């Protein structure tokens, strides 16, 4: 049972609850919530964030391409290669050797992807942008009897959260402390809340809830390999989704990896867009 902490004092996140289920609205919400989640991570003193007329990027320093990302690019045909080269050089100077560079129809110049390829990045299909009506969730899913789910609210539960997520993300064990410090520095209150699932007392699964743009975003969903295919990932995701629903939210969004798409479809999520970017893995 997940404790519903501080539900009544979350009204400031409910001023603009989105109830527009049109495909155009949902695609915009998926992208907006993801961008806001990354920028929220960038608020940590352990991270680095740039928000200039030309770029919006966030570096956590952790060695995973989805945790270091260029979110927005506004360059011109005359300066694009110079600015890309300068940005890559800066990332190298910060020992960031794995990152993602987003592009979409709002990116400039229009052929930005071709320039990124010339600088050594590779095009990647990152999976599905998905959404669900929280009043239409499929909650009739089985999970192990020994599973308990807790809200991360102190150093002990945060340690379990980080330890359980690292095998799925392929992060280095030596980075667990850095990841804990990053998340701990953001605190344990909304708009970001983390959950950790314990199977017979051992941390085995994680999820995050992030509130922005009138929707509930789901992030950091992971299950250790030995505990998969038991409904644990669905259960820890449902914990976040149910809390968002209790708070009055109607729509949840997420970006699903190819491996995770089946899980989210079982919960009732539907695909509304494909998520693509350019990756650099040094």
Image (cartoon, helix red, strand yellow):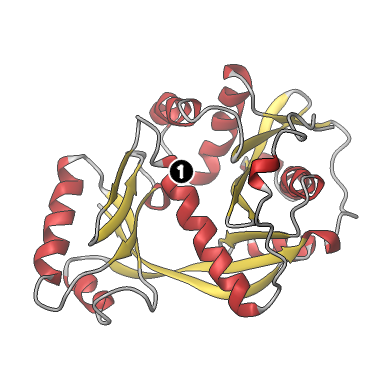
Q: Residues within 10 Å of mark 1 (few under 14, many from 20)?
A: some
> Is residue 128 positioned above or below 162 on the image?
below
What residue lies at 70% left-to-right and 41% top-to-bottom? 11
Picture coordinates of residue 261, whole percent (x, y)? 65, 64
> Is residue 233 positioned above or below 149 on the image?
below
> In the shown orientation, is residue 154 left or right of residue 124?
right
> Is residue 27 positioned above or below 160 on the image?
below
What residue lies at 34% left-to-right and 36% top-to-bottom? 47
> In the shown orientation, is residue 117 left or right of residue 77?
right
- Secondary structure beneath disc 1? helix
From the viewer's side, name the closer residue of 217 and 129. Answer: 217
Q: Quadrant of residue 161?
A: top right
Q: Quadrant of residue 136?
A: bottom right
Picture coordinates of residue 144, whole percent (x, y)? 85, 39
From the viewer's side, name the closer residue of 97 and 270. Answer: 270
Q: Which residue is mark 1?
A: 40
């Amino acid at each position: 049972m997940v404790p519903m902490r501080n539900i009544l004092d979350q009204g400031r996140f409910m001023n603009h609850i989105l109830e527009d289920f049109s495909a155009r609205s949902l695609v915009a919400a998926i992208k907006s919530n993801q961008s806001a989640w990354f920028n929220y991570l960038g608020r940590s003193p352990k991270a680095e964030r740039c928000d200039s007329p030309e770029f919006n990027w966030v570096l956590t320093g952790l060695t995973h391409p989805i945790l270091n990302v260029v979110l927005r690019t506004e360059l011109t045909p005359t300066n694009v290669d110079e600015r890309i080269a300068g940005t890559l050089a800066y990332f190298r100077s910060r020992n960031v050797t794995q990152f993602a560079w987003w592009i979409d129809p709002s990116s400039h110049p229009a052929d930005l992807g071709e320039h990124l390829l010339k600088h050594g990045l590779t095009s990647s299909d990152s999976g599905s942008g998905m959404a669900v009506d929280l009043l239409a969730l499929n909650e009739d899913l089985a999970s192990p009897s020994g599973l308990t789910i807790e809200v991360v609210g102190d150093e002990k539960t945060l340690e379990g959260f980080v330890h359980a997520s690292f095998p799925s993300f392929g992060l280095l064990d030596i980075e667990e402390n850095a990841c804990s410090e990053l998340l701990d520095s953001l605190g344990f209150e909304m708009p970001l809340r983390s959950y950790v699932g314990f199977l017979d007392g051992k941390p085995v699964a994680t999820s995050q809830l992030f509130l922005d743009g009138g929707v509930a975003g789901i992030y950091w969903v992971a299950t250790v390999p030995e505990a998969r295919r038991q409904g644990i990932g669905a259960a820890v995701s449902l914990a976040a989704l149910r809390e968002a629903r209790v708070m009055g939210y109607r729509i949840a969004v997420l970006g699903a990896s190819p491996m995770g798409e089946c899980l989210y479809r079982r919960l009732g999520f539907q695909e509304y867009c494909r998520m693509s970017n350019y990756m650099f893995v040094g």
